[in-house]
Image (cartoon, rainbow, N blue to C red):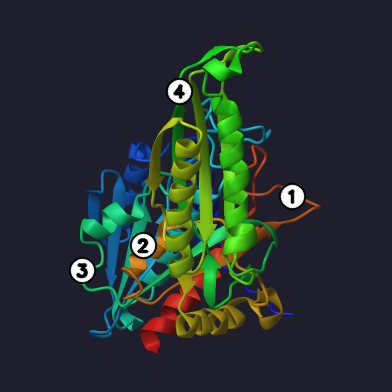
Amino acid sequence: MTEAKLEPEILEEVIKIREDIHMHPELGFEEVRTSKLIAEKLKELGFEVQENVAKTGVVGLLKGGAGEGKTILVRADIDALPLQEMNDVSYKSIYDGKMHACGHDAHIAIALGVAMKLARIKDQLKGNIKFVFQPAEEGPGGAKPMVEAGVLENPKVDAAVALHVAGLIPEGMIATKPKEFTAAADEFHVILKGPGGHGSAPHNTKDLVAIGSLVVQALNMITAREVDPLEPVVITVGKFSGGTRHNIIGDKAEIHGTIRSFNPEVRDYVNKRVKEIVKGISELFGADVEIEMIRGYPPGYNDPKLTELVVRAAKKAIGEENVVTDIKPIMGAEDFFEFSNGGKIPAVMFWVGVYNKEKGYIYENHSSKFDLGPKALETGVLVMSEVVKEYLSS
């Protein structure tokens, strides 16, 4: 078996950075301290650094010394979650209600580790590496504002790559697949209104809870009977509220949900049908309705050729036995794929495993007990470094 090792001094620094950032989590577009730390590290390495990109984003450019060539974008998201940490570790979050429960602290540390490793051999590299540290991935999304701020230009980006730590994949392994990888994520917010009244006289009211219940049931019919069963789609109502007391029919009810899909045409169809069904049922039973449809993150599509390169580089870095490609796409969403600029730029993401039962790394992302160890950090740096080198030399 391959036993790849990262330079001890780089791994030590990567661990230190990760624990520092984990202790000081910051929410989306509030990552002031985090961004300052990132910028300082990049400047120490001699990078060209842009700060305050899309509010709190940072871009570091490393120019290879072996001549002109392609430019690859390496993205790391930097925001934390509004969650109370339940881990008892020396680097536990010092802020109540804030935690790096999705591993973005690891993404930052890994990207900086890659920057350290490649800075040492920049004279051997042909082309450029653009490190993009992106705010607000957890919402409302910082990738699109960074694209709008021009991070894909000067120099023009030819490919984009990112990694994400994954709680259920074994430590020391990576996983990826071509084509569909993550889902598009859209939202719908419905407000039903009508005259309320006493529960004993429903005929004098518009029972919005009953009407809303019909809406929820009808939305389930879209996926069950209107979409090809071979097309993955999820419609979830996450919040349904209405009324104030057991014997009062309220004058307002709210329904909030999410739509997940891969196929752009199916995505458009389902969004249209949600709106039509909500309006139709409301009109049928005489309720007033307000509906807001929010188009969220795009579907994540891994470019097949770039995915093949990642797999090849990963096998070289950590051994074939540690690279998994027979995985399914997930219905989770990621705004990294905004950097593909609508599919014009090949992009790829891969998972880095953190699961280790013996060490207690057994929780999924977004858990208040999510954590990871040095091996995951080392794996991420080794694989991403090799991916960049492979791409620039191809």
Task: Name the residue nearer the viewer: 94 or 257.
Answer: 257
- In the displayed structure, would residue 97 be above or below residue 232? above
Disc 1 or disc 4, which is closer to the eye? 4
Task: Name the residue nearer the viewer: 272 or 38.
Answer: 272
Label 1 sits on a secondary structure element that is: loop
Task: Name the residue nearer the viewer: 392 or 269.
Answer: 269
Judge the density around disc 4: few (<14), some (14-19), many (≥20) Cα neighbours within 10 Å.
Answer: some
For the N terminus, the image quarter is bottom right
Answer with mark 1 or mark 4, whichever residue precedes in sequence. 4
Q: Residue at x 31, y 79 (%)?
A: 123
Disc 1 or disc 2, which is closer to the eye? 2
Q: Residue at x 36, y 53 (%)?
A: 134
- In the displayed structure, would residue 347 be above or below residue 236? below
Mark 1 to mark 2: distance in Å? 30 Å
Disc 4 or disc 2, which is closer to the eye? 4
Disc 4 or disc 3, which is closer to the eye? 4
Check disc 3 and give the amino acid type. Answer: Glu
Answer with mark 1 or mark 3, whichever residue precedes in sequence. 3
Q: Which residue is mark 1?
A: 362
Q: Residue at x 37, y 83 (%)?
A: 392
| Residue 194, numbered circle | 4
Q: Which residue is mark 2?
A: 338
Marks 1 & 3, CB-CB < 8 Å contact = no
Residue 340 in view of the camera = yes
Q: Which residue is mark 3?
A: 153
Check disc 4 and give the amino acid type. Answer: Gly
